[in-house]
Image (tube, rainbow, N blue to C red):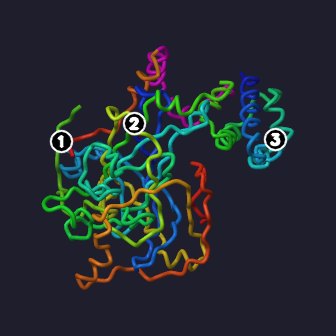
Amino acid sequence: MATQFGQFLRQRREELKETDSSYSLRRVAEKIGIEPSYLSKIERGIEKSPSEHVVNQLAAILGEDPDVLLAMAGKISTDLAEIIQKRPQVFAELIRAAKNLPDQSVLRVVREVRDGDW
Amino acid sequence: MITLEDKKLTFRFPDVHPKACLDISFLRTLRIPDDGETYPLPPGLDTFPLEHVDDHMSKVPGSWLKHGGVMLPMHQSEAMWIKFSSHQITERRQAYPFAIKIAAGKIDAVSGKPWTSTLNFDHQNYVVSPRQPWLDGFCVEEGTIRQFVAMPLGEGYTVEEQLVDGAYTGGLQIQVYPMKREAFEERYPEKQDPFLEQPYVFYSIVDTPKLSMGLGAGGKMKQEIKADPYEPEEWALETSSRCFVHLANSQAWQAITGSKPPTKPLSAAQYSDHKLPWFDHYSEGPNVTCMDILSGVKSVNEIAETKGLTLLENDSVDVDRVIKLRSKYDTDQVREGEF
């Protein structure tokens, strides 16, 4: 999974670099505050467990959804973990019940802003 | 469908496109002087908190429950701007297009006409995201808006009170239409890519004008309302979502929610004294030509003067530093200074 994550990162970064040189390995690493060699290892799948903070920063720079990138890296965001840990039974049941539902049906489970009569 | 996610309204249209998603947030800013001058863009300071009206059923007015939606706190004469962030569809390298109608007190902020639930393609009464990254006020002439400024309803300051007789609505009304999926996919081909109702109970708070705020017209600001670059038939007119955003006087916010409202923002003079930047945004393409209705409304300061009152913190300011924002606005581009 981490290798797929690294491949995706590299491919996305290289695509962006074609039109914007600030997406070079070195400059992206600088923006995040990590060594270029470390980012290179992440992209090649050698470093398999970058921190949530690093993944979130990569998502922001590359314009990707942080939850999707975290999932590709085999992680779950801390806030989601906390939500589940606070009410483990109800969320475990909800997630298991919803696991095979299509996206549209899952989205309908979330709380919508109620529209009224204007 | 609309959800409230961490200080932003998220509009999704899974029936049109699984990734058609637009975030709308409301940002605090300084009120620009209402002195006849036209100012550049002020910065975004921070985001207004948002709460479901239904979470405070026992403490909000009955009319708010009837309208539904969400609420946010504003200080009297505080300014706001509305930020639109359309999600990028990665495989097409394009943010999904949305047509957005914005009204204050059911007066359309672009055309000045009373609220309707339809898009007008002859005299544009909406903005288009991602082309339009934000809206700061009422369109009063081409390239110029008057800033959204919160004022108590019932005292004659708001735009709706100048244009409509009778009961006042207050708040903000938003309706969003996505582009049709076929139109989007035809315009933006795929690029190579790896991958209850409950009984309402009313207690002590009654719907007095002091609690509900509306939006008046503040100082003038340079801001273009970009014309719709798409064809009418490309919009999914039968699929829209709408939301009522109530503006609660910040003094009442704590009583309603139990949370402290944000403190008063900096004044324009304090901001400029610290040599903090203003912004200028230009993008190519035609603008909407504003209708005469809104160019004729009186500003909050003009109304205050007719009442023999003085609008506080309205001194003219010198704008020393203007940062030009690049013409092709990126949703990550920051219109915010370091504070």
Q: Name the one closer to the observer, A88 or A3.
A: A3
Disc 1: which chain? B
Label number found at residue B200: 1
Considering every residue shown, the one lying at the far bottom of the view is: B308
Query: Could you say which is closer to the camera, residue B2 or residue B294?
Result: B294
**Span of residues in magenta:** A73-100
The residue located at (76%, 41%) in the rendering is A17
Give the alpha-carbon distance from disc 2 to disc 3, as whole Å: 40 Å
Mark 2–mark 3 contact, CB under 8 Å? no
Give the amino acid type for the residue marked by disc 3 in the picture. Leu
Q: CA distance from mark 1 to mark 2?
A: 37 Å
> Could you tell me which quadrant the C terminus of chain B lies in?
bottom right
Name the secondary structure under disc 1: loop
Kindly identify which numbered label has been placed on residue B305. none
Q: What residue did someone put label 3 on? A: A25
**Mark toward the start of the polypeptide (1 vs 2):** 1
Mark linked to residue B235: 2
Using the image, determine if residue B233 lies above or below residue B61: above
Residue A91 included in the magenta stretch of the image: yes
Hey, which quadrant is residue B239 in on the image?
top left
Label 3, secondary structure: give it: helix
- The answer to which image quadrant residue B321 occupies is bottom right
Give the answer, above or below, for where B330 lies relative to B194.
Answer: below
The amino acid type found where label 1 is placed reads Tyr
Label 1 packing within 10 angstroms: few (<14), some (14-19), many (20+): few
In the rendered image of this protein, does residue B230 appear above or below residue A7?
below
